[in-house]
Amino acid sequence: MAAAAGEGVEKLEDMIVRAAEATSQHVAAAKNAIGTVIFGQDQVVEQTLITVLCGGHGMLVGVPGLAKTKLVEALGTVLGLDARRIQFTPDLMPSDIVGSEVLEEGANGKRAFRFIPGPIFGQLLMADEINRASPRTQSALLQAMQEQHVTVAGVRHDVPKPFHVLATQNPIEQEGTYPLPEAQLDRFLMQIDVDYPDRDAERKIVFATTGVEEAKAQPAMTAEELIAAQRLVRRLPVGESVVNAILTLVRSARPGPDAGDLGKLIAWGPSPRASQSLMLVARARALLGGRLVPSIDDVIAMAEPVLKHRMALTFAARAEGETIGGVIRKLTSRIG
């Protein structure tokens, strides 16, 4: 019996290894396909892919013109997802996102309400310039992002699977923007900062986008393959040292004794959802790199995008010139 059980475990491990190798190839192909239309943003592309591999939602932050919208469009094509787009504006209403009920009169003269689904019922929802809309409209996404369904007039409507929200956001210092509430920010797996490209990348962009024909992304995966990859990410083993590193890092990012001398800089810190997120993204980053087991380096590399939007500094810390990114780097140096 023991021998048979051992053989069963070995077969299961072999299946996971083979599945991981095949998935890693698919994901690598997807990353290369996106790279044919997005130049000089390798880290942004990698973090966005990791977000989707984890089954989460991502917040792309950067000034206009850095190909945030184009990245999301390319991602939908490459991953074979039904992509929808909402341009957030100050006059956008929650019903413009979720959908609404209309009163119709049938052939028999009876009247009844019919639900007309909004653009949220897509597999990949691009919330473009999400912080241009009012807080009331922003909150229309909350239920779908967390619970995978919306409720209209007391009736539940499930969103399709997989379901991902990739929102773009302008820096909050710009006029006409509304900062997202902490409850909604926490539902984003990562905050992905999009910076200006370097000179060589910008040169490629200039030539690639001003010619007669512009390159288009090609499909590399299907929605079914993506769902299988998301399941695989959750099955990858995680060593005890990596788990301890995640717990130490997240707990030290909160005000209190775990933060040590940095505690006085932190006003509020990440919830246990940050620990869950770090566990998932470390696995996904390992898989993207062709590895079956995540390391502490994966945790350190993903700490800033996972924690940055889940914590805030005190007024005194900001007055002294401290930044959230700088504090996170100091925290990660303790576990590196």
Image (tube, rainbow, N blue to C red):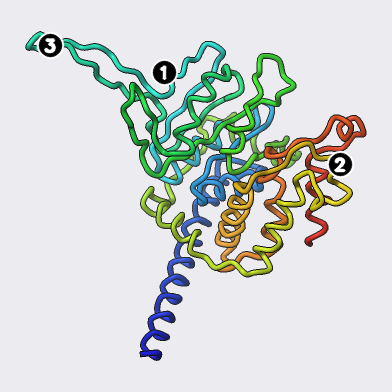
* Whole-percent x, y for residue 61 in the image: 66, 33
Q: Which mark is residue 110?
A: 3
Q: Residue furthest right?
A: 320
- Name the amino acid, label 1: Ser
Left or right of residue 204: residue 141: left
Q: Is residue 228 above or below residue 90?
A: below
The residue under label 2 is 264
Q: Is residue 75 above or below residue 15?
A: above
Q: Residues within 10 Å of mark 2 (few under 14, many from 20)?
A: some
Q: CA distance from mark 2 to mark 1?
A: 43 Å
> Do labels 2 and 3 touch, CB within 8 Å?
no
Helix, strand or loop at label 1? It is helix
Q: Which mark is residue 95?
A: 1
Q: Residue furthest front?
A: 257
Q: Residues within 10 Å of mark 1 (few under 14, many from 20)?
A: some
Query: In this view of the protein, which residue sits in the foreground, 306 or 171?
Result: 306
